[in-house]
Amino acid sequence: MTTTERSPDQVMAQITTELGAGLGTFLTALGLRHGLWAALAGAGPLGVTEVAARTGLAEPYVREWLRSQAAAGYLDYDADTFSLPEAVEIAILHAPGGAIVNACAHLMASMGASFADFEKAFRGGAGFAWHQRDPEYWAGTDALTRSTIHTGLIAAAIEALPGVADALRAGGTVADIGCGYGAPTRMIAEAFPAARVTGYDYHDRSIAEARSRADGEVRFEVASASDFPGTGHALVTFVDSLHDLGDPVGALAHARRSLAPGGAVLLIEPPGGDHVTDNLNPAGRMYERAFHGDQFREVVARLNALGVEVWLPEAGGPVELGSPMHEALMMLLGAQAQREVARARQRVLAAMRAQTRVQGRFLGGRPPYGYRLVDGGRHPNPVHGRWGRRVQVLAPDPVTASWVRWMFAERARGRTVASLARELNERGVVCPSGANPERNAHRSGERWIVRTVAMILENPRYTGRQVWNRSSTTGHGPGGRRGGRGSGALRWNPLSEWELSERIAHEPLVDDETFVAVQGMRVAKPAKDGEVRCYMLAGLVVCGLCGRRMDGHWVHGRAGYRCRHGFTSAKRRSDGEPRNIYVREDHLLKALPHLLVRTAGPVEEGAGEELVDHVREQRLQIHYDSRCLEIRRAQLTLKTVGPARRPVQPALALDWCADVEVVEI
């Protein structure tokens, strides 16, 4: 099912309608709480003054309320009078409509008050637990449950379970999980007075409220869904609670273990189709669920292992994992749900790009070295501002900002990046991971390295502009998408994918002219003869002393490789440490056919490029320690690099081993 093509004006009309409907929820609830709907019921056309007199409310407020309800279509308007249609009266005052609106007003007010906290959880991927809500939300949820679920519904569901109703009439036990304020628990006890009914919830404040409302033999205890006590239950119920649990499968497994023979688990959940197109409606906006890949298969398999069947309307019964038709059905449903996820992702990314480019907003993450986060005032969105949300902006850090300015100034004077790192270490300047150890627990925070200084000099945020999407990672799981949260190697995006603010967003630490000049200094310069240096074995030569890959090193007009054993111009070498080792590339290429003879058979000398390609394809490495040359399989796992140790025997080794090839060069 595809959305009908619409014009931007039509979309704006829908947005306006939905905004009005959201505000209308509170106005409708206001009328319920102050008798406005009751005053209009059965009274025929009434003017503003008459309604105000009947309710004792201020006439200006009553006038605006009546007009808003007429605009919503709930009231008829004619000649400055308002009347309540019979259908609206029944839905709001007699059917559950009014109670649902009143309950949802509590929920929406609570959601607005805690939206900033929920946004943090949403952005970080953390949960937003029940105890993090407030009493208004708990009360609203209880009111919504009581307005949509009644004793007759629960009794009918239990009667449909073979043998369960008789067991309860005989005094069987019931465990109601996630009971909240206890409304469903009391309904079960009312329908089956002889049953021993206990409500369980991990939230102690909800249990305290449930106990205050309890009557008869109903009991309430604090316990989680995965460890509630007791065995031999005739019935375990989850009334509008399973979808809120952190581990629903674990809760169902524990419930099954707690049942008596012939016992049953009863689930009552909000109406929501398992097919995306079944939920493309107003109710679906509240209850839409999405899955993709193997998620549905894995859930069904785990539930089946626990003896629980999963039914789908599209399948016409229980899902059969071995059925080709059901396999195709799950693939179709998963693809449609994944499409909805992709659409949501694109909307979020578009919003983040606009916030960066137009507003210069700080979108989270670590502040760059030299900056700190400070309060930037009221949120620019008026609604968020009314909720008390504040924005955070970057401001120069009083301790580290001066060192960032120093780095740019010194680099602009022509100093090397390595010399800057060395001086920072010698002067004891705290490095980025040391300045913020809480957010860099994975780093030592002990010293500067050349790459850290280089990354600071490359960061355009020091010019005062906000930048987003400089880097990305790979998502969780097999086939994780690029840009997914928190896994995989960091990938630097091309400049064309960056988003830069159109204006200065925070105080700059370097002017544009200096920043551009420093970037120009970082451009690789051609050799004196104008040629580009080419290293055929780049990345394939490994130091036999310390295990590090050897660096390309051009000397005497020839390509070669060297290893400094981890010592750089930013880290001075101590006395007694091994000297650098060097090897010429032409010597390595000459020895390569002899090294490969055992792994590739006879090879022709001089076919350098083909041999190098073979080494790369076979994931081989050349190891050199100044005495001997070996070829080995590349390590597939990371290992700790130990300190280099110069061999005592200076003579070239000519020993041959079973797993390596050694030749003299």
Image: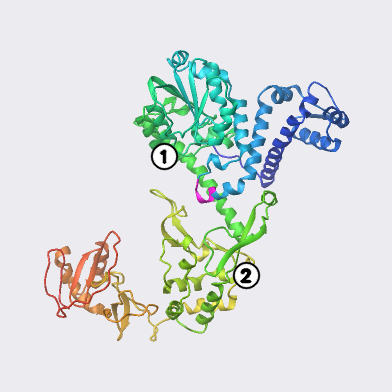
| Depth order, front residue of 350/461 | 461
Q: Mark 1, mark 2: which one is toward the viewer?
A: 2
- Image side of residue 283 versus residue 547, left or right: right
- Whether 122 is among the magenta residues is yes
Callout 1 environment at 10 Å: few (<14), some (14 to 19), or many (20+)? Answer: few
Quarter of the image for the N terminus: give it: top right
Q: How is the image coloured?
A: rainbow
Name the residue rendered at 65%, 25% in the picture.
Answer: 96
C-alpha gap between disc 1 and disc 2: 47 Å
Which tag, 1 or 2, sits closer to the chain's start? Answer: 1
Q: Mark 2: which amino acid? A: Glu
Name the residue rendered at 58%, 31% in the picture.
Answer: 209
| Depth order, front residue of 112/310 | 112
Q: Quadrant of residue 135?
A: top right
Could you say whether the residue bearing mark 1 is in a helix, strand or loop?
A: helix
Image coords of residue 74 (percent x, y): 75, 30
Callout 2 environment at 10 Å: few (<14), some (14 to 19), or many (20+)? Answer: some
Extent of the magenta region = 121-126
- Looking at the rendered structure, which numbered label has been put on residue 153? none
Could you say whether the residue bearing mark 2 is in a helix, strand or loop?
A: loop
Quarter of the image for the C terminus: give it: bottom left
| Depth order, front residue of 415/330 | 415
- Looking at the rendered structure, which numbered label has been put on residue 507? 2
Q: Main secondary structure of the magenta part?
A: helix
Image coords of residue 313 (percent x, y): 47, 27
Name the residue rendered at 70%, 51% in the picture.
Answer: 382
Q: Is residue 181 above or below residue 483?
A: above
Q: Is residue 481 above or below residue 188?
A: below
- Whether 413 is among the magenta residues is no
The residue wearing badge 1 is: 295
Q: Mark 1: which amino acid? A: Gln
